[in-house]
Image (cartoon, rainbow, N blue to C red):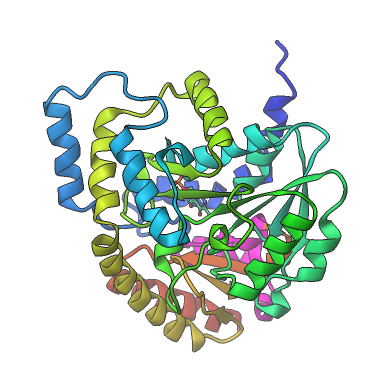
């Protein structure tokens, strides 16, 4: 039987990147001694009051179809948070609740892009972007952020990636895997180019609450971004709610209307009880995220300090997020070989960061989504492995 070419577009390079993670996950299920640092799934439980709100809703019979773009009180709560964050009014009509940031990216891709378009991404980029963007039929053009500059924005590369076919720029800020948070000047470069070339900008801010150095500034807060900038957000990382599949798009009301039509044919809305939990989470955003940020910052310091002592590798301190990139070029191994040998010889699973883009060739990505004791153990195993290599 024949499939549509769509199936090729959604199966890509990014899918194979998870092989090492799946191997480690299976081994862990069989009771083997592995330490999984290959995924960004917070180890904390979702805060109890959020779960309680969802359970109460379930018990109260909230098990029917719910408002397609999300319950008004949830959309209003999200809008209120973004009004404060962006420093301009954001209304409920500018918000749609969807099934996680990943779903939001997919919806944006299908609503904004079509075959023949080009979409520029900052490279390295989160692994699922390639399939998500190609699903629309558009061609993905990568604007390199070089390892030598610490993977910061390269304005010249971004500018030269834009052609008359370009329709949009997609980026994550903070970035996964690099942990880079763009500063005001870098955001301005993107905003200026978007205005000059009349482009959409979709900015994925799932790690916004995990900025360690300074408060996160949204690209959408810059002048001229009101109608063309679309923000992707989620509770997955900020509230330890990856399994709830709860995220949103914030953007111009026309786009939100189209997204609602797409949601009708794809999801038929989100579960009401999930939205009740989400409402409790959004209303307590600062209280929840501050505690989590402090824990991640401590873990980040710990991992950076421990791995800084290892021979042959160099740790890049992230500005934000739950990952650290490690330059393994000094070991003489490719990052793929390093990741697989490390896993086979020590049971520690990390991701070959080259899966996120060529500029990250020679780097591996570790997550710090485990407690400090486990992280120390993992770092000791990595140190032993590096010493053996040296
Ligand atoms: C940059 C980025 N965007 C989106 C996602 C997906 O988030 P969600 O669970 O909200 O779909 C992830 C998950 O790792 C991510 O790192």
Residue 288's place in the image compared with 75, above or below, is below
Seen as rendered, the residue at the extreme bottom is 309
Please tell me which residue lies in front, 307 or 252. Answer: 252
Q: Is residue 347 left or right of residue 106?
A: left
Please tell me which residue lies in front, 366 or 232. Answer: 232
Measured from the top left, where is residue 243 in percent x and y? 34, 42
Residue 87's place in the image compared with 300, above or below, is above
Residue 116's place in the image compared with 21, above or below, is above
Please tell me which residue lies in front, 367 or 100. Answer: 100
Seen as rendered, the residue at the extreme front is 89
Report the span colored magenta: 327-356
- Tell me where residue 139 sits by quadrant: top right
Residue occupying image coordinates x 63% and y 67%: 187
Principal SS element in the magenta part? helix
Q: Is residue 336 left or right of residue 367?
A: right
Residue occupying image coordinates x 52% and y 85%: 310
- Tell me where residue 128 sits by quadrant: top right
Residue 256's place in the image compared with 157, above or below, is above
Residue occupying image coordinates x 83% and y 57%: 161
Q: Is residue 158 part of the magenta span, yes or no?
A: no
Q: Quadrant of the C terminus?
A: bottom right
> Is residue 37 shown to the viewer in this render?
no
Measured from the top left, where is residue 358 in percent x and y? 74, 61
Please tell me which residue lies in front, 295 or 363. Answer: 295
């Amino acid at each position: 039987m024949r499939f549509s070419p769509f199936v090729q577009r959604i199966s890509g390079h990014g899918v194979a990147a998870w092989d090492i993670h799946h191997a480690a996950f299976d081994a862990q299920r069989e009771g083997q001694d592995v330490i999984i640092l290959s995924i960004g799934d917070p180890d904390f439980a979702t805060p109890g009051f959020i779960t309680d709100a969802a359970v109460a809703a379930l018990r109260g019979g909230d098990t029917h179809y719910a408002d397609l773009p999300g319950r008004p009180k949830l959309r209003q709560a999200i809008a209120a948070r973004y009004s404060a964050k962006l420093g301009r009014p954001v209304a409920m009509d500018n918000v749609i609740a969807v099934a996680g940031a990943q779903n939001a990216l997919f919806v944006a891709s299908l609503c904004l892009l079509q075959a023949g378009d080009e979409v520029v991404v900052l490279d390295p980029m989160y692994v699922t972007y390639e399939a998500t963007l190609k699903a629309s039929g558009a061609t993905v053009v990568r604007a390199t952020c070089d390892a030598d500059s610490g993977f910061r924005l390269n304005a010249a590369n971004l500018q030269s990636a834009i052609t008359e076919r370009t329709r949009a720029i997609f980026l994550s800020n903070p970035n996964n895997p690099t942990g880079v948070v763009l500063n005001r000047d870098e955001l301005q470069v993107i905003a200026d180019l978007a205005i000059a070339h009349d482009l959409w900008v979709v900015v994925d801010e799932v790690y916004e609450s995990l900025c360690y150095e300074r408060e996160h500034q949204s690209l959408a807060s810059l002048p001229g971004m009101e109608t063309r900038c679309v923000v992707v957000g989620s509770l997955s990382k900020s509230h330890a709610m990856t399994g709830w599949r709860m995220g949103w798009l914030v953007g111009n009301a026309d786009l939100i209307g189209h997204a609602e039509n797409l949601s009708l044919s794809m999801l038929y809305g989100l579960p009401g009880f999930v939205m009740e939990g989400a409402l409790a989470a959004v209303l307590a955003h600062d209280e929840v995220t501050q505690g989590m940020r402090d824990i991640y910052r401590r873990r980040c310091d710990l991992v950076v300090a421990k791995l800084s002592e290892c021979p042959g590798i160099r740790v890049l301190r992230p500005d934000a997020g739950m990952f650290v990139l490690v330059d393994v070029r000094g070991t003489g191994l490719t990052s793929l070989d390093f990741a697989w040998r490390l896993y086979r010889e020590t049971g520690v699973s990390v991701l070959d960061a080259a899966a996120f883009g060529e500029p990250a060739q020679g780097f591996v990505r570790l997550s710090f989504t485990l407690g400090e004791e486990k992280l120390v153990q993992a770092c000791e195993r990595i140190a032993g492995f590096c010493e053996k290599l040296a």
